[in-house]
């Protein structure tokens, strides 16, 4: 029986716009090498290091500024990163409210401190502040480990405090879903843009 649901954030709850973010880095920041580090599901290079907690937010900003147009500020780098984050569909906000009354909800996200500022604003503006809707947030840069490492799933299971078989994990990355299943979790692959309510209803075996 499922007692807890662990959500990925970007691509599952928050819609992403990779091209909008890419344009912001190239046109507003003047950083032409963004394709070397920006990826739809697993960031690369120093962006990956940022999400693993191996470099600080300021180190990342300085790295980008060193290859950017003259006069670019750290706040310009932050703004360009936030362009990746579109928002939460209203039905998803309603769904999380409904689920929180029946299941323990958690986040497990490859993320970074810069993006999390905007993520928290998005959840707050949707009427579901993160600290209220989720019992705990497992964030890669704080844990210093990344999905799909088995270590991060083991840590999340321990943090939830339930047997792995009583936890449902949902992510839009197949390697992450496969790693979750290898850890003993129930896991489903979500395709961005599809109906999250239907996906969860089928996975949980109940009408939502």
Image (cartoon, rainbow, N blue to C red):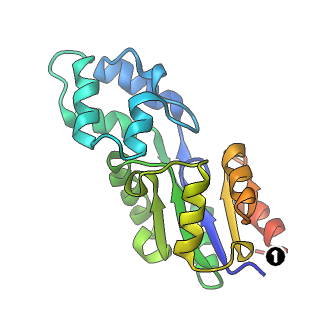
The answer to whether residue 195 is seen in the rendering is no
Seen at 45% across and 70% down, the residue is: 127
Seen at 23% across and 24% down, the residue is: 65
Q: Quadrant of the C terminus?
A: bottom right
Is 127 above or below relative to 145?
Answer: below
**Residue 17 image offset from top left, x and y in percent:** 53, 36
Is 125 above or below relative to 43?
Answer: below
115 or 183: which is nearer to us? 183
Q: Residue furthest bottom?
A: 101
**Residue 14 image offset from top left, x and y in percent:** 53, 52
**Residue 29 image offset from top left, x and y in percent:** 29, 23
In the figure, residue 23 lies in which quadrant?
Answer: top left
In the figure, residue 187 lies in which quadrant?
Answer: bottom right
114 or 141: which is nearer to us? 141
131 vs 75, left or right, is right
The answer to whether residue 57 is seen in the rendering is yes
Seen at 74% across and 78% down, the residue is: 2
**Residue 170 image offset from top left, x and y in percent:** 68, 59
58 or 24: which is nearer to us? 58
180 or 13: which is nearer to us? 180
Q: Quadrant of the N terminus?
A: bottom right
In the figure, residue 124 lies in which quadrant?
Answer: bottom left
85 vs 117, left or right, is right
Residue located beneath label 1 in the image = 207
Judge the density around disc 1: few (<14), some (14-19), many (≥20) Cα neighbours within 10 Å: few
Count up the numbered dots. Answer: 1
Seen at 59% across and 49% down, the residue is: 149
Determine whether the residue tagged by mark 1 lies in a helix, strand or loop: loop
């Amino acid at each position: 029986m499922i007692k807890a649901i662990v959500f990925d954030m970007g691509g599952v709850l928050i819609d992403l716009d990779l091209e909008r973010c890419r344009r912001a880095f190239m046109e507003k920041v003047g950083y032409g090498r963004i394709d070397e580090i920006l990826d739809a599901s697993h960031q690369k290079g120093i962006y990956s290091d940022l999400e693993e907690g191996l470099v600080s937010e300021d180190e990342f900003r300085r790295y980008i500024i060193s290859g950017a147009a003259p006069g670019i500020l750290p706040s310009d780098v932050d703004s360009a990163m936030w362009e990746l984050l579109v928002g939460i569909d209203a039905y998803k906000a309603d769904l999380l409210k409904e689920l929180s009354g029946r299941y323990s909800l958690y986040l497990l996200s490859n993320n970074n401190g810069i993006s999390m500022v905007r993520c928290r604003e998005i959840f707050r503006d949707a009427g579901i502040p993160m600290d209220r809707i989720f019992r705990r947030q497992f964030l890669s840069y704080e844990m210093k480990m990344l999905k799909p490492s088995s270590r991060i799933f083991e840590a999340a299971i321990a943090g939830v405090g339930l047997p792995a078989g009583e936890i449902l994990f949902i992510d839009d990355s197949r390697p992450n879903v496969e790693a979750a299943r290898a850890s003993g979790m129930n896991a489903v692959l979500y395709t961005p843009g599809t109906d999250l309510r239907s996906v969860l209803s089928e996975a949980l075996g109940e009408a939502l």
